[in-house]
Image (cartoon, rainbow, N blue to C red):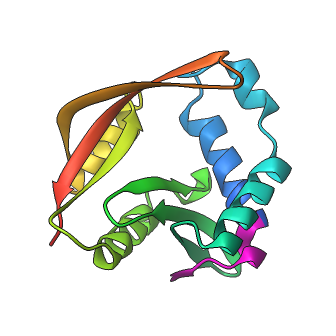
Amino acid sequence: MTIRDATVADAQGIGEVHVASWQVAYAGLIPEDFLARLSVEPRAASWARQIGEGAGRVLVAEEDGVVAGFAAFGDTQLYALYLLPEYWGRGLGRALHDRVLEELSGDSVVLWVLSTNERAKAFYVRQGWAPDGATQTETIDEGRVTLEETRFRRSLP
């Protein structure tokens, strides 16, 4: 497995990871019709723009030539960490997470987790994160889907 900075050429693979992970991880947590309408192409185009413009950092975890996961982050926040579902439970998420922490600076870092996503919350708790009491509501899909999120925080090594 290799963890490296993403390039625009990785955008398609990142889009595939993003859609597949949402469709499995959020099944039963957000509306199924929304998950069914997710499409790789718009996600890949968005990631290509973000990577091309240098808006934050994006790392990919690659195994046997496949983009198996990615993480997006900035100075004090982990914005996204997703893996293809077939790579869950194999240590790839932890390796990607740990690499992100090595790249960050400052005293602490935050992330937002879907409040009902028990699997993700348990993963982050195992990595030393804890809820800090903050919550937020985000709407997506032109206001048709509401996401309740909990903020987690941890000290940097």
Residue 151 percent across, percent down from the top left:
29, 38
Residue under the point 75% across and 51% down: 43
Residue at screen point 62% across, 19% down: 145
Q: Position of residue 38 (x, y in %)?
A: 77, 37
Which quadrant of the figure has residue 115? top left
Left/right placement of residue 144 relative to residue 30 reads: right
113 falls in the magenta region: no
Horizontal placement of 125 versus 18: left or right?
left
Residue 127 at least partly seen: yes
The answer to which image quadrant residue 104 occupies is: bottom left
Provide the residue span drawn in magenta.
3-11
Residue 9 falls within the magenta-colored stretch: yes
Above or below: residue 92 compared with residue 152: below
Toward which corner of the image does residue 30 lie, by quadrant?
A: top right
Residue 30 or residue 151, whichever sits in front: 151
- Observer-nearest of 128 and 132: 132
What residue is rendered at 61% in x and 46% in y? 21
Q: In the rendered view, tell whether residue 64 sits above or below residue 46.
A: below
Q: Quadrant of the C terminus?
A: bottom left
Q: Is residue 98 left or right of residue 5?
A: left
Closest to the observer: 42 or 93? 42
Count of numbered labels shown in the rendering: 0
Q: Position of residue 33 (x, y in %)?
A: 75, 20
* Image coords of residue 20 (percent x, y): 68, 46
Seen in the picture, residue 141 relative to 48 is either above or below; the reply is above
Image point (30%, 27%), residue name? 135
Q: Nearer the viewer, residue 105 or 155?
A: 105
Can residue 128 be seen by looking at this rendering? no
